[in-house]
């Protein structure tokens, strides 16, 4: 039986380790030809190493699949285009992109440097734009294509010490929705996944925060391969009617996230003054205000 992605060509960024590796392996197992992209840098974005990407390529080939390695940087416009060209040179087309590459530079907000902020935005948000934009011209010409972008509960819900990461991951949600709207006429889809799984990045979360050790032990029980089936299915033709959505994976659970919509309103025929807002609007909204929570507060049960 042919796989769900038979003969499709897919680029997976950050695919040398963790979630990206699991996704690349799953894509290949479903019949896709895979560009395994990984700069080979540290969790903080330092250095380069061709080893991780090439190792995954060898694993795919040993299993009977087709793959090539790419060590291009997603943070570079030119590198992103070269990455897509790698797929075209190898197989003559591009059908899917999974924007998974990322780094972490966590620190409490009042201590975060400009470099900490800029570097994380450059890889996660700008990198997702660069690779998606490089593929978009080809998708438009062939009137088909699919993109999957990794967001995070740190942005969707909240977390300590990750203002840069959360901002990037919420930016990716907006980017994905805009791509979905702009590219719909060309039969191009764009969706987000918020993965909860143990990886090199989650392993770098400081364990000094309250409850962090217990939280990390739960995350360690959720392997990266649990995220891969959803990513593969979203790239496949089976997801033809699904675009602009936000999904989450937590072990064997798949969630569809809500999206921002008005939930309450107040009206004052004579208009508003600052005092009237404070005395009437704020109390009216009080029952519907969101608490300051982290993902562990929202997903309070153990992973299934």
Image: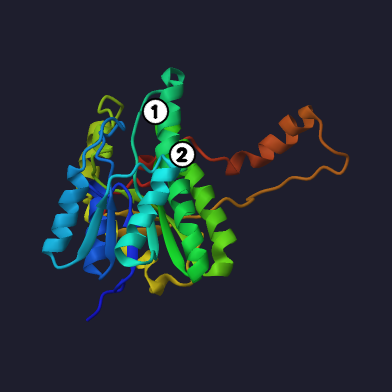
Q: Nearer the viewer, residue 58 or 285?
A: 58
Question: What percent of the width, then of the height, locates residue 275?
Answer: 77, 27
Residue under the image location 51 percent in, 67 percent down: 141
- Marks 2 and 1, how far apart at CA: 14 Å
Q: Which residue is mark 1?
A: 161
The quadrant of the image that shows the C terminus is bottom left
Mark 2 secondary-structure assignment: helix
Question: What percent of the width, then of the height, locates residue 120?
Answer: 40, 34
Question: What percent of the width, then of the height, locates residue 160?
Answer: 39, 30
Q: Quadrant of residue 112?
A: top left
User: Local crowd at mark 1 within 10 Å, few (<14), some, or many (≥20)?
Assistant: many
For the view shown, which residue lies furthest in the bottom direction?
Answer: 1
Mark 1 secondary-structure assignment: loop
Pointer 2 or 1: first along the chain = 1
Q: Nearer the viewer, residue 120 or 107?
A: 120
Q: Would residue 165 be seen by someone viewing this image from the given angle?
A: no
The quadrant of the image that shows the N terminus is bottom left
Q: Quadrant of residue 270?
A: top right
* In-image side of 9 versus 165 (left or right): left
Colour convention: rainbow
* In-image side of 65 versus 209 (left or right): left
Residue under the image location 57 percent in, 40 percent down: 289
Query: Could you say which disc has been placed on residue 148 in the image?
Result: none
Query: Could you say which disc has been placed on residue 168 in the image?
Result: 2
Q: Would residue 80 be seen by someone viewing this image from the given angle?
A: yes
């Amino acid at each position: 039986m042919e796989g769900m992605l038979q003969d499709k060509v897919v680029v997976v960024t950050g695919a040398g380790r963790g979630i990206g590796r699991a996704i690349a392996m799953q894509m290949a197992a479903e019949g896709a030809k895979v560009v395994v992209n990984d700069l080979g840098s540290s969790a903080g974005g330092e250095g380069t190493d061709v080893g991780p990407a090439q190792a995954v390529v060898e694993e795919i080939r040993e299993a009977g699949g087709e793959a090539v390695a790419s060590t291009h940087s997603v943070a570079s416009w030119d590198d992103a285009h070269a990455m897509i060209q790698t797929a075209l040179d190898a197989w003559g087309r591009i059908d899917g992109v999974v924007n998974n590459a990322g780094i972490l530079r966590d620190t409490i907000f009042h201590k975060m440097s400009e470099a900490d902020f800029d570097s994380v935005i450059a890889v996660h948000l700008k990198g997702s734009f660069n690779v998606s934009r490089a593929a978009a011209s080809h998708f438009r010409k062939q009137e088909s294509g699919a993109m999957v972008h990794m967001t995070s509960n740190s942005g969707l819900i909240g977390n300590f010490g990750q203002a840069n990461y959360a901002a990037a991951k919420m930016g990716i949600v907006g980017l994905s929705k805009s791509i979905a709207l702009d590219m719909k006429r060309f039969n191009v889809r764009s969706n987000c996944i918020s993965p909860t799984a143990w990886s090199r990045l989650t392993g770098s979360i400081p364990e000094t925060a309250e409850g962090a050790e217990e939280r990390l032990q739960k995350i360690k029980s959720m392997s990266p391969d649990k995220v891969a089936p959803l990513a593969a299915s979203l790239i496949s033709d089976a997801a033809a009617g699904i675009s602009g959505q936000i999904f989450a994976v937590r072990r064997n659970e798949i969630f569809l996230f809500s999206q921002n919509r008005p939930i309450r309103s107040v009206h004052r025929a004579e208009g508003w003054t600052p005092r009237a807002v404070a005395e009437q609007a704020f109390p009216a909204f009080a029952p519907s205000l969101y608490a300051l929570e982290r993902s562990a507060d929202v997903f309070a049960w153990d992973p299934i």
